[in-house]
Image (cartoon, rainbow, N blue to C red):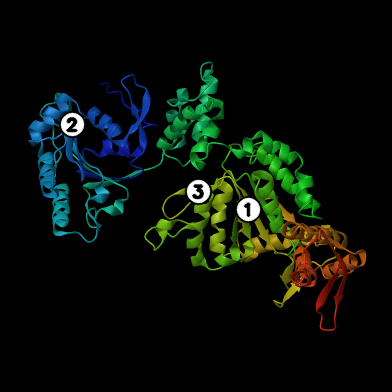
């Protein structure tokens, strides 16, 4: 095999440190991203992603090591590579009794192998202890056998000396240790005292790959994508760069998996972002790129206004965000495309004006079912500790293995509208998590699982700015029904800015929301009459569906009922609905309860009356 060294910029940092420290360190604790792939040189000099074991052996062979012994707690000890010369030499030097390539081994016998290895002069060799995180059930509560083993390993690290191989003239005069390498998920999986004040044990952190490494690895996956036959060198280079940018924060194995997915789904190299998104969210079909969605959004304004009445500014802003999302222009102002959510809406305004209804309507428009949205009432997360419920408890705490309600929900439904109702009621420490969601479009829970928000629309609702505190701390109304919309908008946005900048001291959160704050106006009398008409039509439809009766109201009864329902608009559309329920639906239900429906197809409310005790009744014909 060629001994061509990997380019310094592409060789993993932990591997470069290992090669540099072999003359002065006896043991290495290798922890972190150990199950990833790493760029490794081929005989041709090209680089290819390979497992940690293969990458490690490639470096050791360049240092004139003859073989590597690999131990894992399940199968025992085996020589590596599985080549006749290496296997024969390892078998002879260590008196191995291999069964199907492995030798079962206790911890006591493994300690003996370590001792022999550190003194071996006939050939350079190393021992890799794989799954070392599983050697002890409790690292700080060792059994007698486990304690004796780690004590022997620590003693070997202290007393080991570098040796010069007798079989290689090249290495004479250049002593190096025959090292023991512990392969761990986390450094703390070893007893805490093992590496304490031991200069001969070096800790190496295996980090996630940087951009240059991902870009170099991406080139080896190019042929798995479709339509690559006539690609120019410039297109290949652009593909590698886009692939690397789209996989920011992911291991090299993610690039391999995304490329395999692209191969099975027939994704072209020009659509590499789609392959990465499919990998991240686990869904093959992207609703945002379906042709029918553009048709729906073409008539979105009219559709939304049938359900959210009198809020033209909110409707316009919502449609703009939808069109931007469908056209893939979210975050287009940035120099590098990110993974931000498809859209963000911060809906502010009085209660009962249609903020939550807009979120439902948006879900109906995009996904065909208004119940498909994910709703979180942020008043339930007013205490800091409730963040563990929403986002997942930290590792080691009770319930961390369950993950968080938010992260689990988004992983289950990556294409969705996520509604955070009354967001100002959440604890500020919980709001900090939205910084990562709004900027990077992802969030990792206590289990280490990542939820991606890049295909969601985030909707925040708030009543901020309607009431403020005066100089004495008293709660006063900041805007009132009848104020011009321009006044309402300016005062509410000003109050929201003050809240995030001065009360929360989190202007960065406001900055990430940006210009997506939509202020709803108060319900005006003409709009209230339209809302009333829509709600009354719903009542008539329900009576028709439940009882096969056509419900009609006499003009005088309808007019009186409408006056009752719209006379106080302080509670918005929800208040209109409450009045309609108490002053019409309840007395209608009483009247229907005793009515004989036999032979009836039509039901007319001739009169609605209220007695001295404020009890409303209806007279039916």
- Which element is circle 1 on? helix
The span from disc 3 to disc 1 (Cα, nearest Å) is 21 Å
Is residue 92 positioned above or below 129 on the image? above
Name the residue located 53 percent from the left edge and 26 percent from the top edge.
269
**Is 531 on the left or on the right of 10, as rendered?**
right
Residue 91, horizontal then vertical, whole percent? 10, 32
Residue pointed to by mark 1:
371
| Residue at image location 62% in from the left, 55% down from the top | 419
Quadrant location, the N terminus: top left
Residue 172 in sight here: no
Q: What residue sits 47% from the left and 27% below the top?
A: 263
Q: Is 184 left, or right, of 292 in this rendering? A: left
Earlier residue among tags 3 and 2 = 2
Q: Tell me how far mark 2 sits from mark 1, CA to CA.
A: 61 Å
The alpha-carbon separation of the residues under discs 3 and 2 comes to 42 Å
Residue bearing mark 2: 67
Which residue occupies the foreground of this view, 545 or 111?
A: 545
Looking at the rendered image, the disc whose residue lies closer to the viewer, 2 or 1, is: 1
Please tell me whether mark 2 sits on a helix, a strand or a loop: strand
Q: Secondary structure at mark 3?
A: strand
Crowding around mark 3 (Cα neighbors within 10 Å: few <14, some 14 to 19, many 20+) is many
């Amino acid at each position: 095999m060629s001994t061509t060294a990997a380019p310094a910029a592409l060789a993993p940092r932990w591997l470069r440190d290992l090669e540099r420290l072999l003359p002065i360190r006896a043991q290495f604790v290798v922890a972190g991203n150990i199950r990833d792939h790493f760029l490794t040189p081929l005989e041709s000099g090209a680089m290819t992603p390979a497992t940690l074991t293969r990458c490690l052996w490639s470096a050791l062979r360049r240092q004139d090591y003859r073989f590597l012994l690999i131990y894992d707690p399940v199968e025992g000890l085996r020589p590596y590579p599985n080549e006749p010369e290496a296997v024969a030499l390892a078998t002879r030097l260590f008196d191995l009794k291999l069964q199907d390539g492995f030798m079962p081994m206790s911890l006591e016998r493994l300690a003996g192998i370590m001792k022999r290895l550190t003194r071996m002069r006939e050939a350079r060799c190393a021992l890799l202890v794989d799954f070392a995180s599983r050697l002890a059930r409790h690292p700080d509560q060792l059994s007698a056998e486990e304690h004796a083993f780690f004590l022997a390993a620590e003693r070997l690290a202290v007393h080991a000396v570098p040796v010069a191989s007798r079989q290689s003239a090249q290495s004479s005069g250049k002593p190096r240790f025959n090292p023991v390498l512990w392969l761990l998920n986390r450094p703390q999986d070893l007893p805490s005292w093992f590496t304490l004040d031991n200069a001969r044990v070096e800790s190496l952190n295996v980090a996630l790959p940087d951009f240059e490494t991902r870009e170099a690895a991406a080139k080896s996956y190019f042929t798995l994508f479709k339509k690559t036959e006539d690609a120019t060198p410039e297109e290949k280079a652009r593909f590698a760069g886009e692939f690397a940018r789209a996989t920011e924060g992911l291991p090299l194995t993610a690039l391999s998996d995304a490329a395999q997915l692209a191969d099975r789904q027939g994704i072209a190299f020009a659509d590499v972002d789609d392959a990465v998104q499919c990998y991240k969210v686990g869904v093959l079909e992207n609703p945002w790129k379906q042709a029918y969605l553009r048709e729906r959004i073409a008539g979105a304004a009219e559709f939304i206004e049938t359900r959210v009445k009198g809020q033209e500014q909110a409707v316009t802003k919502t449609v703009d965000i939808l069109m931007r999302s469908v056209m893939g222009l979210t975050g287009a102002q940035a120099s590098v495309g990110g993974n931000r959510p498809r859209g963000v809406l911060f809906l502010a305004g009085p209660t009962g004006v249609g903020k939550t209804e807009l979120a439902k309507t948006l879900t109906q428009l995009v996904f065909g079912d208004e119940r498909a949205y994910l709703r979180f009432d942020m008043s339930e997360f007013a205490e800091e500790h409730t963040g563990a419920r929403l986002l997942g408890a930290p590792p080691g705490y009770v319930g961390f293995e369950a993950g968080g309600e938010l992260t689990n929900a988004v992983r289950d439904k990556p294409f969705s509208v996520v509604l955070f109702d009354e967001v100002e009621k959440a604890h500020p420490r919980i709001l900090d998590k939205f910084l990562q969601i709004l900027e990077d479009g992802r969030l990792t829970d206590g289990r280490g699982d990542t939820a991606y928000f890049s295909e969601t629309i985030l909707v925040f609702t708030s009543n901020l700015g309607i009431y403020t505190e005066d100089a004495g701390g008293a709660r006063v109304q900041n805007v009132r029904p009848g104020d011009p919309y321009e006044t309402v908008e300016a005062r509410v946005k000003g109050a929201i800015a003050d809240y995030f900048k001065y009360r929360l001291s989190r202007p960065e959160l406001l900055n990430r929301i940006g210009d997506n704050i939509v202020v709803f106006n108060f319900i005006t009398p003409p709009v209230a009459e339209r809302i009333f008409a829509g709600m009354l039509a719903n009542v008539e439809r329900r009576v028709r569906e439940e009882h096969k009766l056509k419900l009609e109201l006499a003009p005088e009864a309808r007019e009186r009922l409408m006056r009752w329902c719209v006379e106080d608009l302080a509670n918005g559309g929800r208040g209109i609905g409450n009045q309609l329920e108490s002053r019409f639906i309840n007395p209608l239900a009483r009247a229907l309860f005793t009515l004989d429906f036999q032979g009836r197809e039509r039901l007319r409310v001739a009169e609605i009356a209220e007695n001295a005790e404020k009890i409303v009744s209806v007279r039916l014909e």
